[in-house]
């Protein structure tokens, strides 16, 4: 893969800065969905309570995903500062512009990401 051009690096840096601003707002909104909800057992049936518990679990999972993505964005911004942005953290090869354009916070090339996911699965 080719190294990033200066224009591509600038474009991706702008995308990362935008994500660094947007994700905390999304986390604030997600926090509202994960708050404990008190249900009046006299007026709400068991299925409604189960539905609410499932919705809350999904909201917590979504919040964890947002938190992880924000960590990745911050790590990518740090990599921009130290000159290692766009380099796979596993194999140290260039990640490739198309992958970074789709997910500017990624720290791994597609091949290494697939290998990491295979190890977890």
Image: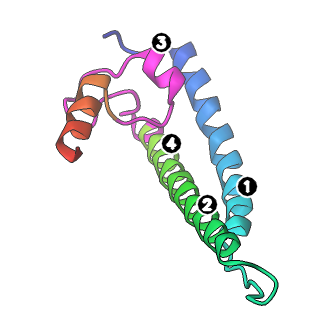
Find out whether the residues at labels 4 and 3 contact each other: C-beta distance under 8 Å. Answer: no
Tell me where the magenta segment starts and ends, as one range.
80-107
- Secondary element at tag 1: helix
Residue bearing mark 4: 77
Query: In the rendered structure, which disc, 3 or 2, sits on the residue that comes first in sequence?
Result: 3
Which image quadrant is residue 2 in? top left
- Secondary element at tag 4: helix
Find out whether the residues at labels 4 and 1 contact each other: C-beta distance under 8 Å. Answer: no
Which of the labelled discs sits on residue 5, or is there none? 3
Which of the labelled discs sits on residue 39, or is there none? none
Relative to 17, is 4 on the left or the right?
left
Which of the labelled discs sits on residue 59, or is there none? 2
Q: Nearer the viewer, mark 4 or mark 1?
A: 1
Asked if residue 97 is among those painted magenta in the image, a careful observer would answer yes
Separation of marks 3 and 2 at Cα, in angstroms: 39 Å
Separation of marks 4 and 3 at Cα, in angstroms: 17 Å
Identify the residue at horizontal 70%, vertical 48% (top origin).
21
Give the camera-side residue of 72 and 84.
72
Residue 27: x percent and y percent? 66, 59
Name above or below for residue 91 compared with residue 19. Answer: above
Residue 99: x percent and y percent? 44, 21
Query: In the rendered structure, which disc, 3 or 1, sits on the residue that comes first in sequence?
Result: 3
Name above or below for residue 9 compared with residue 72. Answer: above
Separation of marks 3 and 1 at Cα, in angstroms: 31 Å
Residue bearing mark 1: 25
Q: Nearer the viewer, mark 3 or mark 1?
A: 1
């Amino acid at each position: 893969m080719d190294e990033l051009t200066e224009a591509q690096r600038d474009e991706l840096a702008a995308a990362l800065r935008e994500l660094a601003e947007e994700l905390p707002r999304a986390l604030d909104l997600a926090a509202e969905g994960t708050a404990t909800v008190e249900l009046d057992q006299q007026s709400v049936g068991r299925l409604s309570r189960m539905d609410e518990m499932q919705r809350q679990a999904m909201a917590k999972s979504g919040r964890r995903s947002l938190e992880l993505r924000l960590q990745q964005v911050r790590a990518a911004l740090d990599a921009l500062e130290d000159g290692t942005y766009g380099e796979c953290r596993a194999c140290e090869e260039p990640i490739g512009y198309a992958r970074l354009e789709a997910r500017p916070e990624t720290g791994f090339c597609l091949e290494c990401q697939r290998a990491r996911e295979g190890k977890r699965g």
